[in-house]
Each structure stands twice: as structure tokens, then as C-alpha cells.
Amino acid sequence: MLPYTTVEEAEAALNRTLTAAETLWLKYSANKSDYLLYCHNLPLFFLSFSLVPLPLIAVELIPYFRRYKTQPHAQTPLPQMMACYMNVIKTFIFCVGPFQLLSYPAVKFIGIRTGLPLPSVWEVSVQLAIYFIIEDYTNYWIHRWLHCKWGYENIHRVHHEYTAPMGFTSPYAHWAEVLILGFPAFLGPAIVPGHMVTFWLWFVLRNIEAIETHCGYDFPWTPTKYIPFYGGAEYHDYHHFVGGQSQSNFASVFTYCDYIYGTDKGYRYQKKLLAKVLINELYSLYGK
Ligand SMILES: [Zn+2]
Ligand SMILES: [Zn+2]
């Protein structure tokens, strides 16, 4: 809870005028406990997970967009999409939710702050970039471990039930996997703690990124294509397409871990092969 309740008190404490964003934050958070602010993560996850994949459902029903599908012949019927959604919501209510509510002491301990001043756009951007890099690296190694015989058969098998992923499948996994992969997500904020607003933004962006990675469409206009070393939908789709035997494309966000540790060889070989087939088809089409 903030140590001041009015704009005047806050301005006197900071010795400057509040920005519009800070005034808004003060008015919103002044009478809310830090615990309640932390709990905002729950509706934020629920809303982003429920709303972001909705346009993808519409896209699935329009034949024009089939040309952008990562697996053109794969189609997920609406009832199956809804079953997947309900399954994730169940895991969310009985596993993620209680864990989030109980993990507040850890958040307090690492020093996520809720007061003023608010962080600058630059500070938020740098922290988010660090969180993504830490999450990607840690997730890479946990994901590799989940592909060992025991990890796959007992835990990770559930996430691979969908060989052609779609938006709602991003957090579709065994409850133990959902909890285990919470660790890489918390590690960034634990190492470089920031403001609660950054903390919220991080979890929402990570959620949206996972939905995009699992959406099953490789749209040429996706802005994430401009992020260096970004994996994206087509990259992670290969991991699902190959399935349980996959020893390729483990990273959650970027491509460099797979490149450095040599776990993208199958994917690169397949891309080369597809390019060759395409060139041969073009040659035969135009008689050259
Ligand atoms: Zn996997
Ligand atoms: Zn996946």
C-alpha cells in the first residue's frame, strides 16, 4: 500500500509534479494492499488467455487464411478447441491460481515494488528484455529434460497431444509442467526485480508470446518477425509436428540456444529439403 493517499502528498514526497501515468497509478492503487495488486496477475492471465486466441478461432473458419497455416491440412474442430480451453481453465483454477496466491511471500521477498515513482519506459523495456532472455534459457534446459524418457512419459506427453498446435494449446500441459515452467518465468523478476506494473506486463506478454508461438499460423506481417533470433509459430510448430521423438527446437522464445547447442539440425535439414522441393517444382512448372 502506498504511504500517501493524495496527489499533493505524493508530490511533496517526490519533490516534483506527478506524471499522468503516476497520478492514475496513485488513484488506482492507493487503497489496495500489495497482496491485492499481486493478485491482479490472475484476471490478467485469464483475460489474455481467453481473449487473445479469439481472432485465431475466426481465422480458422475463413478459408483464405489457410495459406498461412504451418500445417495446411491440420484442422481443429471448434468443440476440440473448447475442450482444450476448458482443460486449461481447470488447471488454472485448481493449480496455477492457488499457487499464485500462496507464492506472494516470495514476491515480497524478491522486492517487487508497488510505490512511486513509476519506472520509465526504458527501464521497463530493459527489464522485460532481460526476463525474456532468462526465461528462454532456463526454459530451454527444462524442456530438454522433459524430453527424457521419464519426463516425457510422465509429464510432457500431455503438451504434445496436439501435433498441430493452436492458440489455446500454449498452456495445455500436465499440471506439474505448468508449475515447473513457472520457475523460469519467476527467475527474471527474482534476479532483476522491478515494479508491479512491469511484473504484470511481463506475465501478459509472455502469455501472448506463447499463444503466438502455438497459433498454428505463420503470418508474414507478424511484428515479432523483426525481433532478432525470434523463433515464432513456424519454429515451434516443427517441435510439435515431430512430436515426442523431437530432439529439435526446444527454446520457448528465441532460436540461438538451439543453434548453439545443436538442437535445430533436424529443423534446418527439413527447411533445406523443403526449399529444394519448391525450387524443383518451380522448375518443372516453368519448363526450365
Ligand atoms: Zn516438447
Ligand atoms: Zn508447445
Image (cartoon, rainbow, N blue to C red):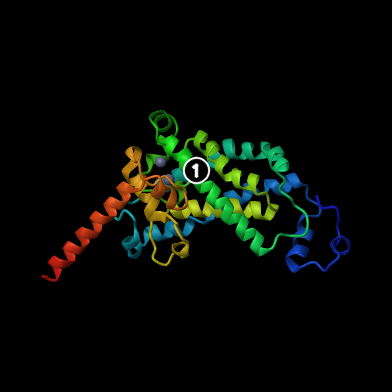
Quadrant location, ligand no. 1:
top left
Q: Which residue is mark 1?
A: 139
Q: Is residue 191 left or right of residue 137?
A: right
Q: Residue at x 38, y 43 (%)?
A: 162
Find residue 123 and report its image quarter: bottom right
Picture coordinates of residue 101, whole percent (x, y): 67, 39
Picture coordinates of residue 117, whole percent (x, y): 77, 60
Q: Residue at x 40, y 60 (%)?
A: 59
Q: Residue at x 41, y 51 (%)?
A: 166
Q: Amino acid at mark 1?
A: Asn
Camera-nearest residue between 188 and 262: 262
Q: Secondary structure at mark 1?
A: helix
Camera-nearest residue between 261 and 132: 261
Camera-nearest residue between 160 and 152: 152
Rendered view: 157 above or below 34: above
The number of callouts visible is 1
